Each structure stands twice: as C-alpha cells, then as structure tokens.
Amino acid sequence: MAEPAKPQATTVYLYELAWILPSIAIPVGMLVALVVTAFGVGVHVPSVAGRVDPTKVAQTPPFDQPGLVQVGPGRYEARMVAGIWTFAPNEIRVPAGSSVTFVITSRDLVHGLMVHKANVNVMVLPGQVARVTGRFDRPGEYPMICHEYCGVGHHTMWGKVVVE
Ligand code: CUA
C-alpha cells in the first residue's frame, strides 16, 4: 500500500492563509460597516428623546392629546401613550408614501412598540419619551404590537397602522 503523499510546506502555508485572511477581513469589514452606518448614514439605536413625569402623562403635552398630527408634506407625528393594555391611539391612518414619527411614552409600566414591516421597534418606558420614524410606502395594514411582557393582558395590547 502506498503511503499518502505528505503535504508540501507551501500547501500548509496557503491553507493557513486561507483561514487567517478571512478571520481578519470579516471583523474589519464588520467594523467598517458599523462606522459607515453609524456616522455616514446616521443609523442609531432609538434612544431617550425626552423625559416625562409618568404620573402626569395625561396632563403633559403632547401626550395630553394623543393622536396623529401632520407636520409636513407626507410627514406625520403619532403622539401615543402606552398603558395596560392599550395604545392610545390604537389605529393610525396615513396615505401611502408617508413617514410617521412615533413619539410615545408609558403611563404605567414597561411596554414596547413594534410596527410590523416598518422598521419601528422601541422600548416604551415610564418616564421616558421614545421617538422613532418609519416609512409607509405600500398600502395595507401594519400591525403594531407591544413586545414587552406587561402582564396578563399583554397579548391583547396591539393596534394597527392603516396605509391608504
Ligand atoms: Cu404592553 Cu406588553
């Protein structure tokens, strides 16, 4: 029986290189993507957009009048209050091609707001104002749900954005 051929030194070297190079290139590529999206494109995780006394949400503008306000051509602001177990308002209607900035806080405990298929996903914390903008180009219904467990009625806490 013939012995298996011994690998050449250069073969081993190339094989190692084939692993080493991607292991450097992939993290470098990820870092570049992170820097470009954060500083070049301005993509950020939604952060605290303001503070509000959670016991006085109903008296504090703009949350004393929850609803949809047009702030420019094709631009809307949805002023919302989350509470067990509803969103106020729980239905928003906008024409197709609109961008909607959700300004939302909680009047009781920790909730979340996620609008399906619209890249809207924020934590809604008492005392904090969250602000996030989504685009609605295609007509249809976009469910908005609470994605933080907030008690026995959590699963009933939902609404929708209707794009006409
Ligand atoms: Cu509110 Cu879950």
Image (spheres, helix red, strand yellow):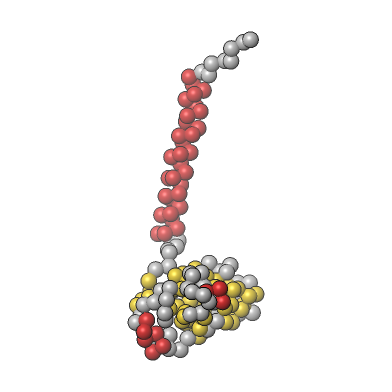
Q: Residue furthest top?
A: 1
- Looking at the image, which is closer to me, 69 or 143? 143
Please say if 3 is above or below 150: above
- Looking at the image, which is closer to me, 70 or 124? 124
Q: Position of residue 30 (x, y in %)?
A: 45, 49
Q: Name the residue rendered at 47%, 29% in the picture.
A: 16
Please say if 15 is above or below 62: above
Q: Residue furthest front?
A: 152
- Looking at the image, which is closer to me, 16 or 84? 84
Quadrant where the N terminus is found in the figure: top right
Q: Position of residue 37 (x, y in %)?
A: 45, 58
Q: Name the residue rendered at 57%, 15% in the picture.
A: 5
Q: Position of residue 139 (x, y in %)?
A: 65, 75
Q: Is residue 155 visible?
A: yes
Q: Name the residue rendered at 36%, 77% in the picture.
A: 127
Left or right: residue 4 compared with residue 37? right
Q: Is residue 99 visible?
A: no
- Splitting the image into 4 quarters, where does residue 93 fall? bottom right
Q: Name the residue rendered at 51%, 23% in the picture.
A: 11
Badge count: 0
Q: Position of residue 110 (x, y in %)?
A: 43, 73
Quadrant where the C terminus is found in the figure: bottom right
